[in-house]
Every structure is written in C-alpha cells, then in structure tokens.
Image (spheres, coloured by chain):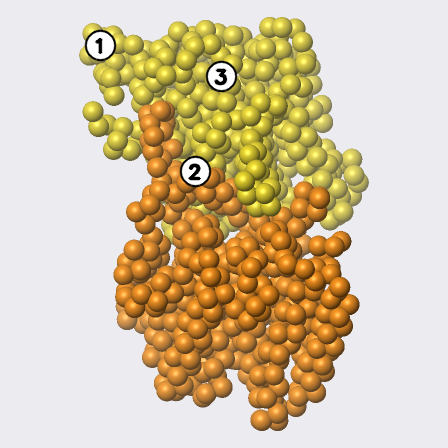
Chain colours: A yellow, B orange
Amino acid sequence: MSNPLAVLRVFALVLLVFALTMLVPAAVSGYGQDSAAGAFQFGCAITFASAMLLWLLTRRHVDELRVRDGFLLVSLVWVLVPAFAAVPLLHFFPAMSFTDAYFEAVSGLTTTGATVVEGLDTLPFSINLWRAMMVFLGGMGLIVLAVAILPLLGVGGRQLFSAESPGPIKETKLTPRMAQTAKGLWLIYLALAVACTLGYVWAGMGWGDALVHMLTTLGLGGFSSHDASYAFFNSPRVEAVAIVFMTLAGMNFATHFMAVQRRSLSFYWIDPEIRWYVGVMYASVLGIALYLWWAGTFPDFLTALRFSAFNTVSIATTTGFANTDYAQWPFFAPLWMLFLCSFVTCAGSTGGGIKMMRALIVFRQVMREVVHTVHPNAVLPVKLSGAPLPNKIVFAVLAFCFAYMVIIVSLTLLMVFAGLDVVTGFSAVVASFNNTGPGLGEVGPATTYKSLSDFQTWVCTIAMLLGRLEIFTLLVVLSPAFWRK
Amino acid sequence: MERLLAVLNVFSRIALIFGLMLLLPIGVSWWIGDGVLTAFDEAFFGTMATGGFLLLATQRFRRELRANDGVLLVVMCWTLLPLIAALPLLLGIPGLGFADAYFEAVSGLTATGATVLSGLDKLPPSLNLWRTELHWIGGLGIIVLAVAILPMLGVGGRQLMKAEVPGPVKEAGITPRVTETAKGFWVIYIVLTAVCTMAYGFNGMNWLDALMHAFSTVSLGGFSSHDASFGFFDSPVLEAITIGFALMSGISYVTHFAALSGRSLRPYRRDGEVPFYLGVLGTSVLLVATYLWQQDYYAEFATALRHAAFNTVSVATTLGYASTDYSKWPFFAPLWMLFLCSFVTCSGSTGGGLKMMRAVILYKQVFREITHAMHPNAMTFVKLGGSIVPNKIILAVLGFGFLYMASTIFFTLVLAASGIDIVSAFSAAVACFNNTGPGLGLVGPDSNYGVLNDFQVCVCSFAMLLGRLEIFTLLVVLTPAYWRK
C-alpha cells in the first residue's frame, strides 16, 4: 500500500466527474418541468460537495498510483459511487429504503438491470433517464476497467493479452495507459450509441424511449422505462435492432477498436472468443426455439424463433430485457438461458459472468487432463489463438472459475437460509452475480426484486459487486495481507 | 481390437469371481426358503456359463496387461458387471423393467443406495441381502478385490488401482507390493464389517438385518431392507453405531492401513484430510441441529441434535440412510446436507463426491491466487499435511473440480429438460453423481427413484457410474486418442 490518501484523491476526482453527470437528468427534469428536479439538484449538490471536501482534504497527496492501489481505487469506486447515485432516488421516492435505493444504483452501475421499482411507465422521464444513464456510465467505466485496469491487476480475462500491449506489467504506472486506452474505446462506445439510437428510432421508438433503451442496451444493463420491458413495443423490428446491438456490445471492445483502427473485419475472425460467443449463443437460440415449438408453447416455429431469439440473446449477453414472461416457458428453457449468461460474453465487453475466454481455457485444460490420464508424462500446452498459455494464467483462470462457482453455491445457500424458495434464491444469485438482471420465480421477468427482504436484497447487491469486480478485486482488498505494510 | 480381447480375457475371470458372490444369497435363500432360489440359481449358472465361454474364447489373446489397459478393464467391470448383478432382481421381482433393474444394480455396486423398489420389507430377504452385498463388493472396489485375489493382476495392479481408487494423489499409500496393499485394505474392510454386524446384532437388530446394514454402512451405500430405512428401528443406540461406522468408513483406507500396520493412531493425526473432515461434519451437525431447533421444527434441542446428527452424517458421508423424512425440514437443512455430500469424504475412502483433499487443495489455491494478485512474482506453494502439492496435481485437481461441477449442471439440465421439477432434478443429479442415494422432492427419502421414467433412470445410472469412476476414467475411454496406436 503506497498511500491510501493518494487513492482517495483520485477517487474524489472520479466522484467529481460523476456529480457533473447528474446535471444531465437535472437539466432534463428542469426543462420538462417534472417533479424530480429537486431530487437531482439535491443529489448533485451532495455529491459535488462530498467530492470537493474529499479532494480538499487529500489534494496534497499527489502520488503515482501503483498496481496495488488499483485494487483499492476500483473497489472504492464501485462500492461508494452507487451510494451517491442512490441519493436522487431516495429523495424522489420518499418511501424507498436506503437498502433498495443502493440496490437499484448498484444494479445500474454494475450494468445488471435488476430493479426494485414498480410502475416505471408513470415515473418522470428524468428518473428513468438517470437509471439508464447509470447503466451507460457503468458500462463506460467497465470497459476501461476490463480492458485497461483489471489486466494490470492480473485479474481480468484480458490479462492474457498483456503480452501484446506495450510495457512491462510490474509496477507500471496506472494512469497514462488508462487514459490512452480509454479514449479510443469510448469513441467506439459512443459511435455504437449513436447508431443504436438511430436504429431504435428507425424501428419506431420515440426519441425518449430510444435514448433510454440505447443506454441500457449498450451497457448490457437491461433497465427499461416500461414495466413490460420490450413487450410494451411488441415490434419485431425493435427487437431485431436490440439483438444486433446486444450482440455487438457483448464482444470485446478492444477487438472493435482494432477493427475500426485498421479498417479490417479480419480481427473479428482472429479473436479467439467471438466465433464461440456467436456460435454458442445462436445455436442456443435455435435449440430453444425448437424446444418451445416442440413443447407446444408457441404454435408456429417463426413465433417461437422470434421470442427465443430476443430473450435468449438478452439473457445470454447479460442484458436482461424480456418481451414475454419467459419464466412461464417449460423450465429447461429459462434454466438454459441462465446457464448461458454465466459464461457467454467476451472478456473486455460490458457483459458479466466468467466470460467466454475463461470458459475456453478451462475447457482446454480439462481436455489436457484427459490426455494426461492416458499419457501421464506428455507435455501439452493449453493454446489460445495458436499461442501456448503460461501455466500461471491457467492457474489463475481455473481458480477464478472455482471461486465463481463456490460463490454461487454459498450465496444460494444463504438465500435459502434467509427463507427464499430454491428457484428464486438460485436464480436471483445467478442473475445478480452475472449482472444479468431478471431471475425466475419471485424475481422473474414479470416481477421485480421488491419482494425480497432487506437481508436478501443485500446479498444480491454484494453478488452484483463481486461479479462486476471479478471476485478477486474485492477479495484482495478484504484480505488482511493487503493492509499489511 | 487386440487390447479389447486381452482385457476381455481378464474381465471374464473377474466376472467368474463375481458370479461366486451369488453363492451367499443362494445359501440364505435355500436356508430360509424364501422362494427366489430358482432366480438366483439361473443367474448363477448363466453367469458362470457366459464367463466361462468368454474366458475360453479369449484365452488365445491372454497377455500381461499394459499401462492404459487398466482404464478399459475398470470401465468394463463397472458397466458390465451390473448386468450380471441385475439378473437375480430381474428374475426374482416380477414386473421390474430392465432399465430399473440395471439402475438398482449400478446403485448397489457404486454404493449409492438410490432404489427404484418399494415394499422392501416384503421382498424376499435373500434379494435384500444381494442388494446390500453389491454395496459391499463395490464399496471398496471391484478392482481392488480382483487385485487382491487374482495373482495375474499383480504386475499391472498399480495402474488398475489408480484407475479405480478415488482421490487426486493416486500413488500415495499404494505400496509397490500392490497385492499386499489390496489384501490389507480388504482385511480392514472385513474386520470393520464384522465388528459393525456384531454391534448392530447385539443392539436389537436381527442378525440378517445386522449383516445387511453392516454391508451397506461400511461401504457407505445406503440400501436398507426397510422402506422406512433407519426410521424403522427408531433406536438412538443403533443410530449412534451407524454414525460411528460411517465416520470411520469416510476416512482413507490408506490411513487405516498405515495405522494398522504401524499399530499407532499417529497416521490419523498426520492425515491432511481427517481434521477438515471431522471439523466440517461436526460443525454442520451442530449448525443443522440449531437451525431446526430455532425454526421450531423440533421442540427440544436433544431431539433436533439426534436427527440432525444421524441424517447429516448419513448424507454427508454419501451413505444415504434416513431416520426421518428430512426433505420436510426447512429447505436450508437438506440443501446444506446435499452440499456437504459433494465434498466431505476423504480420498481413498468408500465415499463419493469431490473428496475433501481436492476441496482443500482448491480452497488453498484460491488464496494462493489472491496472494498472486498482490505479489505477481511471489513463489507460493499449496501445502497439505505438511508437504508441498506439485503444480501438476493442482492443475489436475482444478480441471477435475471444474468437470465435476460441469457434470452436475449437465445432469441437472438433462433431467429438467426431461420434464421433472428443478428441485427433484438437481437433487437427483447431486445424489446420484456423489453416490449418496436419496435426493429431495420426487426422489426424497420418503419416496424413491421408481417414479422416474426409463430415460431419467438411465441418466441417473450414468451419473452414478461417472461419479464412482471419477469422470476421467470413463471419459478417457471415450476419447479417440485412447484407441490410437
């Protein structure tokens, strides 16, 4: 630990920027004369004041951030910023508890999309905009987090490519590369945002709806401004646009960046994940469509395909929109969708779960062990894109997957202990931990997380944070060794 | 092809030995005249004839077994011997389908204890004896038995034992004189069984019941001659005896062997697993008892403790007796018990699941990764029982752990897709895969697997075999690489 105060200073700056983003809904609210103007002004003022105060207290501690400080900074941002993001919600909904407001903010900023708010259609536009903006901002932060910061910390799936990127990993200064990488990636993100908005408007949404849904589509969040989510629009065209942009947002942004920079589509082919990502997801779309058709849920195959395509892609990419209550489908279909959301998206995207990259590595490691059983002394490297992976990375990936499953099992047990039925408990944990959103049972697509008790809500909140920060970031900060000199 | 025939030759010898095991129920059936003597006779002569024919037909191809032949032999024994074992059941129980009979035999040999039969109390005693004898033969291992008896297996025996004995460090404790080791294991096993029979017999069971329950207790199987399982006896003394022998059977036979040959208790203390095994079990018993008492399921703590102790130890050690219908307990308790059964027993014991040694290695590896995240270049080690675990084994354990969880998810999905509810599907998958026996819901301790259709029964049979052979052994035979020259 070089200097926690220097970390706090950077955090204060992040918070300052975040306070500024609150001006957007405040302005929208003021312009539209809706009832939430006061809430945003209050929230903005509090956030701004806290950030200033923190900055004034720590401004003398200018210090280069080192790798270990990154853990603290990232954890601080994702744990504390939601508390400020929740302020406008708390102010606007007088009956809402802090637990619920913090849950909603964490759900937004981690791009999960699980909600405790009902009656979305009657809310002022600015409140829905703020919820969607949290997803979008969370997505922006996340891209940087996933592509630039976590690899440096040796946590994210992208650490595999650290060999490609310039500079040694050890003791690298965090900021300069972050800024450089971030700019390029954000440009892609914003370009996709514009395209997505236009797409939605072309498909028939109003501008307001298009904006809100674009923000949550690209962040792979899943908040909607309608209780019925996409069933409100009931338009195959809108759904098609959503499917395209969800699929794009689930790919590695670094690959998008390379493809744009070098003006070549071949990068999508070279990327080791994308073919599996697309293959597994769309094979599942077909499989589920056939299953639903066969089970008689939908009378004709085309309808089955439409609903299967939208909901499967939405859940698998960890977005969480729904255009029908898929929890009513034969149970295998939603279970398969939840299974997909735990590993399908690519590393370096805004999606959640263990990521396709890790799934591939684990799969190849398992195959290697099978061969080892026959030929105990064979030397077999695990390869990705033709290059052998060092065992160190294989270890890290396997340990991650193990920790991932243990957390799902323990949190499910905890939820059941707290009195939930097992379907609700398990699906809530999976949907929160993978940052997907809707689960099944009591927390299914047709309902919200409102029915959960405070304790259960906190479990979900922690699951979302753990999932977003790829487990180890938080675990490292919580380990005593981290705070030892 | 040549390999197949050579292995078939050895297999036919094992089948003949296995056929001799039928003499015990034949004797009992003759003695008490329970009407199924012809069924056993037909099965006996059928087995002997088939075995003899196979032996003669393949005698030409007889050769010393080579490395890797063992895997095939093990798979052959475990998939084909249940066919023989199922014969008396098929012939003696009218109306029993083939899939069900095979399931019952696999459940017996893998020491699982899941049954498709109801009305056990009215079944001819010799059939019940045969069911529990299957547990007893399969519990310690068919191959271990074969190595102890067949002198021709002495040379390749090491390979064979490695393919069958559960646990990550297969070499440990299997001395170069592998026949001696196998004999030692069987002596301990027989002594334990004899002592257990006497303990049951002197404390209120009739002697036939005592023998059957001793067979299924020390093998951690779980078949009983009563539909109500241990609820039939309703005796705290018998339950205490069961707990004691289940606990002993869950410890590695390598450790028992070392303790016996050195005539000291030191090996138990130095064993890396035993402290965790007893610690986790003890804590869980107290936890479940307190939970049941606090939820007012039992009015008195002593009653809660009695039932919690018996059923938790029984399920966690993958035995599978029940003294009460624990699936009626508040849901957290049975879920926790199922969770335990997936990892609690020690490697080299008669129990199933992931094994405590792997769980401890996985757990330590996760902490190692946390340290690595902070100190990327630190040299760290995973230690177990005072010695360093080589990286190669950690990789194998991680691969296995992942495959284990993937298999559980796979079986759950398949069972759910075939149309049973999720609780039954999941619990059946876990209970079969870990060789425990009773699940929850449809297949709970109060019910049985007879309610499943043929497809589901076959899936469960496969799960039991895959679990007993620790996945890799079965998987290897299915890879093309294994059959290549």
Type of amino acid at the residue the image marks with label 3:
Ala
Location of residue A104 (image quadrant): top left
Question: Observer-nearest residue: A288 or B101?
Answer: B101
B299 sits left or right of B355 in the view: left
What SS does tag 3 mark? Answer: helix
Evaluate whether label 2 is on the same chain as label 1: no
Does the residue at mark 1 contact the one at mark 3 (Cβ under 8 Å)? no
Residue at position x 63%, y 48% from top? B476
Pinpoint the chain carrying mark 1. A
Pinpoint the chain carrying mark 2. B
Looking at the image, is mark 2 or mark 1 nearer the viewer? Answer: 2
Q: Residues within 10 Å of mark 3 (few under 14, many from 20)?
A: few
Type of amino acid at the residue the image marks with label 1:
His
**Is residue B289 placed above or below A96 in the rendered structure?**
below
Type of amino acid at the residue the image marks with label 2:
Asn
Q: CA distance from mark 1 to mark 3?
A: 32 Å
What SS does tag 1 mark? Answer: loop
Does the residue at mark 2 contact the one at mark 3 (Cβ under 8 Å)? no
Q: Where is residue B91? Give x, y as percent.
A: 71, 80
Residue at position x 67%, y 54% from top? B418
Question: Observer-nearest residue: A79 or B272?
Answer: B272
Pinpoint the chain carrying mark 3. A
Tell me how many marks there are. Answer: 3
**Is residue B203 placed above or below B483 in the rendered structure?**
below
Residue linked to disc 2: B391
Of the numbered discs 1 and 3, the one sitting upstream in the chain is: 1
Residue at position x 27%, y 61% from top? B266
Question: Observer-nearest residue: A275 or B403?
Answer: B403
Residue linked to disc 1: A61
Q: Residues within 10 Å of mark 1 (few under 14, many from 20)?
A: some
Residue linked to disc 3: A163
Q: CA distance from mark 2 to mark 3?
A: 23 Å
